[in-house]
Image: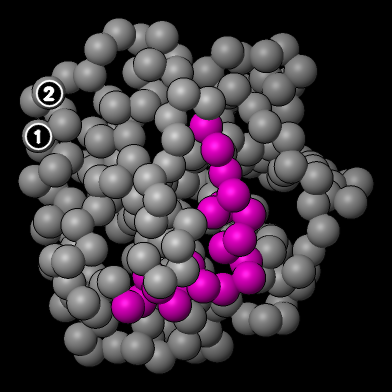
Amino acid sequence: MFKLYHYALSPFSRKVRLVLAEKKIEVQLIEERYWEARPDFVRLNPATKVPVLKTNKLVIADSNAICEYLEEVNPDPPLMPLSAEDRAEVRRLNGWFDDKFYHEVTLNLLGERVFRKVMGTGYPDSKNVKNGSKKIKIHLDYMDWLLDRRRWLAGNRMTMADFSAAAQLSCLDYISDVDWNRSELVKDWYAKIKSRPAFRSLLADQLSGFPPPPHYSDLDF
């Protein structure tokens, strides 16, 4: 059995969990408070970041490395397109959400409102929260633009790019920081992903001291 060291509201952990569940791969989830730098975890990943996947043969860190490994060893159902051009677009969007969206939105909203308290690093910085609230509108509009031209974010089939985006948005939805009324296209896209069996474990997540809003686990919003 695979072991996944993760944190419930880590979007990168959530992306890997979605891929594992979509491919029906059995995994043991081990919650890791990675910022505490537990010695045994540091030995697994000196970067002290989640997720980390441990198999019988190796230890893999970095969500994209894990996801592409899982795609190669468990190709069904496929989450990467066949053509090099289409795969490049999926990887571009993975980078967009893992880097740009995460740093402009997730860190400024989830990071300030939740992680500061959980990690004991002080009080929320209102300037960062305001900036995150502004930036998420731009990202939702970009997603709307993509979905107006494609069935899914990277093309006409669901790919890892959709899981990268959904992982980020699901963390923000946990704290009611997504305006789903801004785009019907984005809302419908998220509803399709949210209703997949792979999403069920994410909807069951509970972070002590931060109960999710009622709509979080409601498949019909």
Q: Position of residue 204 (x, y in %)?
A: 59, 49
Q: Residue at x 82, y 58 (%)?
A: 26
Q: Position of residue 18 (x, y in %)?
A: 59, 61
* Label 2: which secondary element: helix
67 or 142, which lies in front?
142
- Give the magenta range: 188-207
* Label 1: which secondary element: helix
Most common SS among magenta residues: helix
Q: On the picture, is 95 further left or further right than 70?
A: left
**Mark 1: which amino acid?**
Lys
Which class describes the residues within 10 Å of circle 2: few (<14), some (14-19), or many (20+)? few
Q: Mark number for residue 130? A: 1
* Residue 4 drawn in magenta: no
Q: Residue at x 53, y 18 (%)?
A: 35
Q: Write down the residue under mark 2.
A: 126
The reply to whether callout 1 and callout 2 are in contact (CB within 8 Å) is: yes
Q: Position of residue 55 (x, y in %)?
A: 84, 47
